[in-house]
Amino acid sequence: MTPDYPLLARQLEALLDSRDWLTNSAQTCAFIMQEVPELNWAGFYLQREPELLTLGPFQGKPACNPIPFSKGVCGAAARTQQTQRIEDVHAIADHIACDAASRSELVVPIMTRDRLWGVLDLDSPRRARFDTTDQAGIEALVAVFMARSDLE
């Protein structure tokens, strides 16, 4: 069942009552993990050094850290600054397997002032979990997070 993403966006907007990016990123990934079905990981990777993503707030099993822009689905999202929607992560040659149960992935880059701030990474144990509706819905949730947060 596809979540009601417009409703989730309104709920997330109400939840994020602080401008603090750290609090809001923790709340956002917890909210997504609770409200979007069939996820086994939801979290942020931040760009704090050139060409490198560093683990931020997340929900799920311990994660890989750091991730270079040259590796994996998160790296591809950071490098291209475009959302990556992968039906089968095992078909990706340089996929970084933090959790062997993950089968599909959706990674949304977070841009601020024409630079990459980080990415939101969602993993699912179901192959082809994410469709275009999910992509648009999660991108809308990222837009709410960005609008409600002071991103450094």
Image (spheres, grey):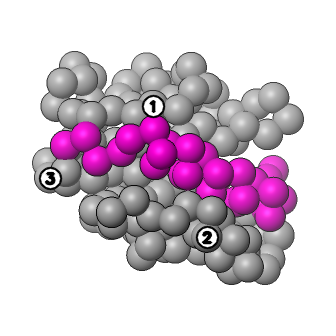
Front label number (2 vs 3): 2
Q: Tag 1: residue type?
A: Gln
Q: Gap between marks 3 and 1, in whole Å?
A: 19 Å
Of the two numbered discs 3 and 1 on the same chain, state the one appearing first in sequence. Answer: 1
Q: Characterize the local packing of mark 3: few (<14), some (14-19) or many (20 or more) Cα atoms within 10 angstroms.
A: few
**Residue 38 location (% of width, % of height):** 28, 62
Query: Which residue is nearer to you in this view: 105 or 5?
Result: 5
In which image quadrant can residue 27 be found?
A: bottom right
Residue under the image location 78 percent in, 80 percent down: 17
- Residue 97's disc is none
**Residue 135 location (% of width, % of height):** 49, 43
**Residue 113 location (% of width, % of height):** 85, 35
Residue under the image location 48 percent in, 45 percent down: 133
Front label number (1 vs 2): 2
Query: Which residue is nearer to you in this view: 40 or 67?
Result: 40
**Residue with the mark numbered 3:** 101
Mark 2, secondary structure of its residue = helix
Q: Gap between marks 1 and 2, in whole Å?
A: 24 Å
- Residue 84's disc is 1
Mark 3, secondary structure of its residue = loop
- Residue 7's disc is 2
Magenta stretch?
127-152
Asked if the magenta segment contains residue 143, the reply would be yes
Residue under the image location 37 percent in, 25 percent down: 71
**Residue 70 location (% of width, % of height):** 43, 20
Q: Is residue 76 left or right of residue 152?
A: left
Mark 1, secondary structure of its residue = strand
